Image: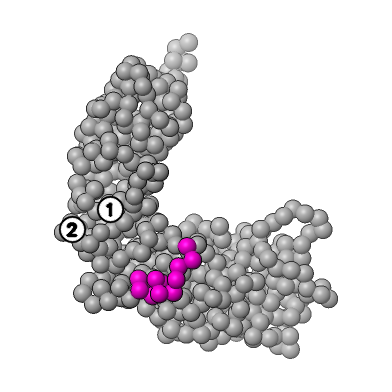
Amino acid sequence: MHTCRSLYHAGIPHLLFHNINIRTRAKLLSFCRFILTDPSRFRFLRHLDISVPGRFKTPRKADLLLAMFMYAHQLQQLRIFDCEILDSHYQIPFAIAALTSLKSLTLHLPNDSAYQMLKCMRSDIVKMDICFYRDDEVPQDPVPLLSCLCHSLQELRVTYAHFECAVGQYYPSLRTLVVDDCQFAKVEPLAESFPNASDLSLWMGQEDDNLEVNEIEECRSINQTAQDNVGWDGLDRLRGDILSLYMLGLRCQVYHLDVQSTFLTSPRSSQLRAVLSDSRPSMFSVRINAVKFEMSFLPPMLEPVRETLTHLIVYMDLSDSSDEPDGMLASDFPLIGFASLQTADSSSFYPQHGLLASLQFLDISFLVLNVCWDTTDQLPQHPTEAYLEHMEFEKMARAAKRCVSSLRYFVIDSGRRPMSFWDVSHSERGTRPLSAEEGWLMLAKEGVSIGYDLAGCD
């Protein structure tokens, strides 16, 4: 019995130290009773995630929740999915605001109680994630709302926002800004409020709005004109969909341009060319739909970065590939430009057909090819799926080097086998496979973020 009691007491700190994720009001009440039974347990509580709809309507239950927050003096990360829970007791927002240990705060569906809490926070929060979606709400401007955190905040993620004209409030410590669903976003308030941002992600959420050409061009023109007076000198990373980045119209040097959330199709290539011309990146990540994108568009699209681009990361979606006659795989063509990988040689090399062949004019040193395919698990097996399962990585690496003579490293991920890393820097020695350890070290050295830039084609 003594041993069981010792194990029980020793296990509590271990359990509380990890993220506590609560999904129902019953479990939230149970947790409050558990931790309030012995207040010394609060010193181990670091991460709390409350995804509970609605609020407590009885005083006794609301008092338990209030007491829990009043004692949570070591809490570092707090996530509240539905801020209506704050209305359980009028003092709960003030109890949270009085904490001084919080470093990360996530609020979804914020209400008046949440806004009141944010105006008097005592913690030096460095990471904030706030989603303003509510049926009865219009987009909110986070700049004045979060002014209490302006000196400590380093990372801000905001959804359904609208940034007004400059209000004289700026966030000097903020480096990472992620903005989702911000229609017709303006550069001026963003650059003035976050002058030291180096990592910017922005989605205007208007890809499916069927905007008129004049609406798109007007937004882009306003943003480009504004940069005559205000803007960033440069960014380490810029992310977004093609239309949002085009309308944002940033005219500054960007190290890594990452076009996310949409697969490139031919009609969007002229807009992406303009974005590339504006940002002149050294590293470029792009998603291509092999069926809907004509590879002949690639060279003129990439022409503006011919002198600056050194690293290229391509996610190729082959999901719509159809069968080819005579045993030739449709997926061979968009990937390389060979009539058949099985007989790849100079006589079967067609520069106009494939991705790798379309990169011949570049002087890149680093290429990642991430091939996507939505499996159907149907029989007979689709030729493209069979091809991905049996892809010959060494032939692909040799083809990449033959097409891009400046290439030093080639990485390929077929989604069916572990990622394959190749050193192709020495033409006389041919291609050399790298071990997984060598490959990941090489990615780190090249500045490709592990687990993010190569996260796949989702």
Give the left or right position of residue 53, taking residue 371 as reference.
left
Q: Quadrant of residue 97?
A: top left
Q: Is residue 184 magenta?
A: no
Q: Is residue 212 magenta?
A: yes
Q: Which residue is at the front of the view, 217 or 85? A: 217
> If the image is split into quadrants, where does the C terminus sit?
bottom right
In what element is the residue under mark 1? Answer: loop
What range is drawn magenta here? Answer: 209-220
Residue at 31% across / 18% down in the picture? 59
Type of amino acid at the residue the image marks with label 1? Asp
User: Is the Cβ of the residue at disc 1 closer than 8 Å to that at disc 2?
Assistant: yes
Type of amino acid at the residue the image marks with label 2? Val
Residue at 65% across / 75% down in the picture? 334
Residue at 35% across / 74% down in the picture? 218
| Circle on res. 141 | 1
Residue tagged 2? 167
Q: Which residue is at the front of the view, 418 or 39? A: 39
Q: What secondary structure predominates along the stretch shown in magenta?
A: helix
Q: Quadrant of residue 383?
A: bottom right
Report x, y in % for residue 269.
51, 77
